Image: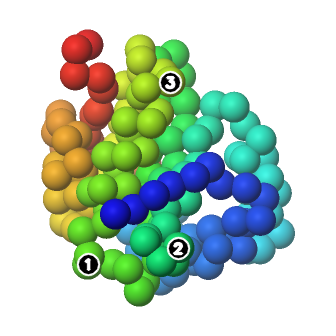
Amino acid sequence: MLKFRNATLEDSIIYFKWANDQAVREQSFISNEIVWENHKKWFEAKVKDTACEMYIFQDEQNNLVGQVRIEKKKANEALIGLSIALEHRGKGYAQIMLKLAAESFLSKNTDFIINAYVKEQNLNSKNAFEKAGFSFTEINVHEGFNSYHYIKKLEWR
């Protein structure tokens, strides 16, 4: 079973490592390698930003598995993203992480819809979002790439 906590400034290095993983960069909408100084400033700002929830996930042995970030973007809409440590990919963690993070965020932000955009070729993430209960809305162009658009909101909304 996975557990999660809010990210802290001490997590900056592991986020940097995960973000610069080659497979993560390939599936990101901005695929350039991230520079440490830029990441450090960005990370410090995001950890302090009340519009951004950053979760670190760990397994039963407290090994770091991955992260999910949900950021409020405009009135009642948020954007979700995730990455998983190379050694933990293919274990089904993505769907669990997405489900737990979305539930946590929506329990505090009941009037929000969480948007997810997945590049068309990223079938692993597509499947994870579907298994996590996100609803497919359409294929559209997001940041210059054909993408699956998924949403998640509280069931009673």
Q: Nearer the viewer, residue 50 or 119?
A: 50
The residue at 83%/69% (across/down) is: 37
> Which element is circle 2 on?
loop
- Pointer 2 residue: 62
Q: Is residue 68 above or below residue 90?
A: above
Q: Looking at the figure, which quarter contains the N terminus?
A: bottom left
Q: Which image quadrant for residue 12?
A: bottom right
The three-letter code of the residue at mark 2 reads Asn
Q: Are marks 1 and 2 in contact (CB under 8 Å)?
A: no
Mark carried by residue 108: 3
The residue at 73%/55% (across/down) is: 8
Q: Which image quadrant for residue 133?
A: top left
> Which element is circle 1 on?
loop
- Pointer 1 residue: 90
First in sequence: mark 1 or mark 2? Answer: 2
- Left or right for 123, reference 38: left
Disc nearest the viewer among 1 and 2: 2
The three-letter code of the residue at mark 3 reads Lys
In space, the residues marked 2 and 3 are separated at their CA atoms by: 26 Å
Q: Is residue 146 above or below residue 59?
A: above
First in sequence: mark 3 or mark 1? Answer: 1
Q: Residues within 10 Å of mark 1 (few under 14, many from 20)?
A: few
The residue at 41%/14% (across/down) is: 111
In space, the residues marked 3 and 1 are separated at their CA atoms by: 30 Å
First in sequence: mark 2 or mark 3? Answer: 2
The residue at 77%/41% (across/down) is: 48
Q: Which image quadrant for residue 50?
A: top right
> Which element is circle 3 on?
helix
Q: Are marks 3 and 1 in contact (CB under 8 Å)?
A: no
Q: Residues within 10 Å of mark 3 (few under 14, many from 20)?
A: few
Across the whole image, how many numbered discs are drawn on residues? 3
